[in-house]
Amino acid sequence: MSDGGAHLPAAPPEGAAADWTIPQGWGDYTAAEHAVWDRLFQRQSAMLPGRASQAFLDGLDVLRLSRPGIPDFDELSERLMKATGWRVVAVPGLVPDDVFFRHLANRTFVAGNFIRRPDQLDYLQEPDVFHDVFGHVPLLADPVFADYMQAYGEGGLKFQGLGGLHRLARLYWYTVEFGLVREAGDLRIYGAGIVSSYGESVFALDNPSPHRVGFDIARVMRTPYRIDDFQQTYFVIDSFEDLLRQTLEADLAPLYRDLASTPDLDIAELAPGDRVLTRGSQAYARSKQDMKP
Ligand code: HBI
Ligand code: FE
């Protein structure tokens, strides 16, 4: 996940290709780095059944590669190509928005090739290989979600010039990173930022603090998000098909015009017309606010 690559230099870093890709360097990972992956993988895959969407759990199999530890992107891409035509490519970290959108439009998913340190197990700001590959890649094996990710990238390329970048970033944030989906008469997680986090995989479904609101693309584009803590509002889609339909049908140019004259909502504000599934107490966010120095 990220707050956008806007503040990045235009030119790719030393050693990176024009599309910001670098060799993954699978052979250079140390046993300690593979051990961090294994520890995070075991912990999350043990606690996600019943919490993560079935499509995510099914997609996890694409990661069960022949070798232990951090997946080899080439081996992973061979399996992913067979499923949905996607490939995973290594990048040093966040890439500029237009580079990111172009990769998605070409069905290549950019994944950081570094992994967090053992003392960062529970939180880090920049997306590392665990966030990017464990969090995002399993759903790229789902045909409908794979189409959504490509449609998102194409939309980004087409509309980022219309000053809609921050709105596109919100759409990405509240779906791909922190989305919930109705499933089996319950709520399930599909957002990469949640499934790759132990704490948020519990908080997003069980905690009475956050709002849970039915997804609506215009509503999401009016809603700021947090990059430093658990979300205060989660948006719930009815299905990946519905998310794809709303995104493909959204005529973003008039939507941006309407949104330009509509004030943003506060991060924890509920709007008239919201399909409120949980009216959260916001107790968690308030408690963190009280602790702020
Ligand atoms: N770069 N490597 C990487 N990973 C992302 O998830 C990412 C990015 N750049 C921009 C971006 N995400 C989003 O914030 C949106 O701007 C789309
Ligand atoms: Fe992410």
Image: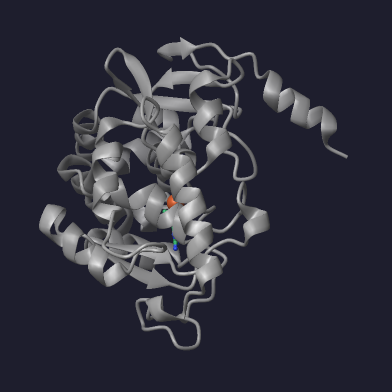
Asked if 111 appears above or below 230 in the picture, the reply is below
1 or 3, which lies in front?
A: 1
Quadrant in which the C terminus appears: top right
Residue situated furthest left in the rendering: 82
Residue 162, visible in the rendered structure: no
Residue situated furthest bottom in the rendering: 15
72 or 177, which lies in front?
A: 72
The x and y percentages for residue 185 are 29, 12
Q: Residue at x 57, y 19 (%)?
A: 207
Q: Quadrant of residue 221?
A: top left
Instruction: Judge left or right: residue 267 versus residue 43.
Output: right
Residue 214, visible in the rendered structure: yes
249 or 33, which lies in front?
A: 33
Instruction: Judge left or right: residue 264 versus residue 241.
Output: right
Q: Residue at x 27, y 60 (%)?
A: 65
135 or 223, which lies in front?
A: 135
Q: Residue at x 28, y 51 (%)?
A: 155
The x and y percentages for residue 102 are 29, 65
The x and y percentages for residue 211 are 53, 19
Colour logic = one colour
The x and y percentages for residue 251 are 25, 39
Image mark count = 0
Q: Quadrant of residue 67?
A: bottom left
Q: Residue at x 48, y 65 (%)?
A: 34
Asked if 289 appears above or below 145 in the picture, the reply is above
Instruction: Judge left or right: residue 247 versus residue 127.
Output: left
